[in-house]
């Protein structure tokens, strides 16, 4: 397994020796554009926030997609809508802008920009509209991820006005189901994965993490998968529990399994939560496997028990190792019971790789030129899974968290730190402009 502290130390070594002494004249123009267009950028954010785009509101997600199309096409992007109704979701917006070519091929890094159109707030949520609160802006998706998308647009507009966008080879994928992905996941993320295979670097415009007052760089994300344990045992009168003839029942067996998980599985960067448990004379999960219907009495030995949880790991080796341990624990059933476990893949891990460390170093060169503090690599325990993980194995490197800082995400207290929008847009515009002329 990759040891994050070792790679973190290597990343810190890259903070020194910025490539540029200060923002160039072209970069100064980008900074000025972002500042001069603040009202325009905030108006776009308000417009998008006021359009509900819960993952299950297919028409709303498409409407936000049209808003983004209207911003991207004037910048020279060829925009395509990928319908995903076959997966139960609206679809994805994909935009492409090819870079210049020379006799020896295109210069610079091929960049993949990632964001998402949907939010966790469906039309029946009471949290529906934008509200300015001083230096904060509250509303559904104000940060996650409509705030990230306006950072992206502000940066691209600044590049366009300064002339650096013409040098860039950029593909953008804005998924419509990041908060509640369609199924099968292989279809839902097919186009994002394909874009990753065409790219050199991935830049994800989800929210910036500010940890103890410091802006952080995310170069690793853990996976998000699920597991389910089903136990079957001999039922009977409760007076016979633990006897040779009756056994231990399903609930004691399930409790044994869960406690053995807690005692035997722990590793650095690994978590395994239990989110649902049920047991009794009958226990059955619904079709979405998020509720359990249970029957039972105090004087019976439970004959069925079920549990579901998640598994989050830093790399594929840790996933495989942990799943093998879990299978072994489940297999050593108490007398009178039999158990089985099944796993469902979800979001893959984004393990730290040298290209991501180098990318964070380039970001810190930008920070130095902007007079900003260097960004340390964020401990992946402090974030959940993300779409960038689907392309992590194919790109040379990736960085997450190019969107704005926020508070209260996924709650009716969600609000974006407005000043961080301009800070992040400047970082992104300069970083992308420099990547655009970096020889591969």
Image (tube, helix red, strand yellow):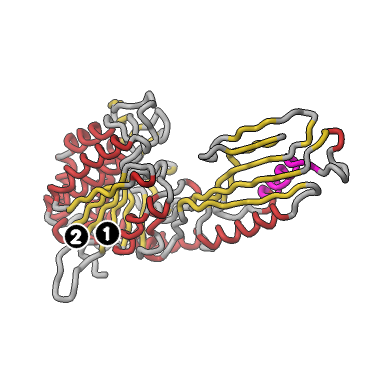
Task: Give the number of the disc on residue 227.
Answer: none
Magenta region: which residues?
Answer: 248-262
Which label sits on residue 111?
Answer: 1
Q: Residue 256 colored magenta?
A: yes
**Residue located at (56% from left, 35% from top):** 291
- Residue placed most toward the observer, 66 or 405: 66
The circle drawn on residue 168 is 2
Pointer 2: residues within 10 angstroms few (<14), some, or many (20+)?
many
Within the magenta stretch, is there residue 175? Answer: no
Residue 105 x, y percent position in the rendering: 19, 72
Image point (81%, 49%), residue name: 335
Q: Is residue 247 left or right of residue 137?
A: right
Residue visible at 34% across and 39% down in the picture: 118
Circles 2 and 1: CB atoms closer than 8 Å? yes
Which residue sits at x=44%, y=60%? 352
**Foreground of the two, 327 or 272:** 327
Q: Is residue 224 shown above or below 292?
A: below
x, y (%) of residue 244?
88, 46
The answer to whether 384 is drawn above or below residue 48 in the figure is below
Where is the C terminus found, in terms of image quarters?
Answer: bottom left
Distance (Cα) linking label 2 and label 1: 8 Å
């Amino acid at each position: 397994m990759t040891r994050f502290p070792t790679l973190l130390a290597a990343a810190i070594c890259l903070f020194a020796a910025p490539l540029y002494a200060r923002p160039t004249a072209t970069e100064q123009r980008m900074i000025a554009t972002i500042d001069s267009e603040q009202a325009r950028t905030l108006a776009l954010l308000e417009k998008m926030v006021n359009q509900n785009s819960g993952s299950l509101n297919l028409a709303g997600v498409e409407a936000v997609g049209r808003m983004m199309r209207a911003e991207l096409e004037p910048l020279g992007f060829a925009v395509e809508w990928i319908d995903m109704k076959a997966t139960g979701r609206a679809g994805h917006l994909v935009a492409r802008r090819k870079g210049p070519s020379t006799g020896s091929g295109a210069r610079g890094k091929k960049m993949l920009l990632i964001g998402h159109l949907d939010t966790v707030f469906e039309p029946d949520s009471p949290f529906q509209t934008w509200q300015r609160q001083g230096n904060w802006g509250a509303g559904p998706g104000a940060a996650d991820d409509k705030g990230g998308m306006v950072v992206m647009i502000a940066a691209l507009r600044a590049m366009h006005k300064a002339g650096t966008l013409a040098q860039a080879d950029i593909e953008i994928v804005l998924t419509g189901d990041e908060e509640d992905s369609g199924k099968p996941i292989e279809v839902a993320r097919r186009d994002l994965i394909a874009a990753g295979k065409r790219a050199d670097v991935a830049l994800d415009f989800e929210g910036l993490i500010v940890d103890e007052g410091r802006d952080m760089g995310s170069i690793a994300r853990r996976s998000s998968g699920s597991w389910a344990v089903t136990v079957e045992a001999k039922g009977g009168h409760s007076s016979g529990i633990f006897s040779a003839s009756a056994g231990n029942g399903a609930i004691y067996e399930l409790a044994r399994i869960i406690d053995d998980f807690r005692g035997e599985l722990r590793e650095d960067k690994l978590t395994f939560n239990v989110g649902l448990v049920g047991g009794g004379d009958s226990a059955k999960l619904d079709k979405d496997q998020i509720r359990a219907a249970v029957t039972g009495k105090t004087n019976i030995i439970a004959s069925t028990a079920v549990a579901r949880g998640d598994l989050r790991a830093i790399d594929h080796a840790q996933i495989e190792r942990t799943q093998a341990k879990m299978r072994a624990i489940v297999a050593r059933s108490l007398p009178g019971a039999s158990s089985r476990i099944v796993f469902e893949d979800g979001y893959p891990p984004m393990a730290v790789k040298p290209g991501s460390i180098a990318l964070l170093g380039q970001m810190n060169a930008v920070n130095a030129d902007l007079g900003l503090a260097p960004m340390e690599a964020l401990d992946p325990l402090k974030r959940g899974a993300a779409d960038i993980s689907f392309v992590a194995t194919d790109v040379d490197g990736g960085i997450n968290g190019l969107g704005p800082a926020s508070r209260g995400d996924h709650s009716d207290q969600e609000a974006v730190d407005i000043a961080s929008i301009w800070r992040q847009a400047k970082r992104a515009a300069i970083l992308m402009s420099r990547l655009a002329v970096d020889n591969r």
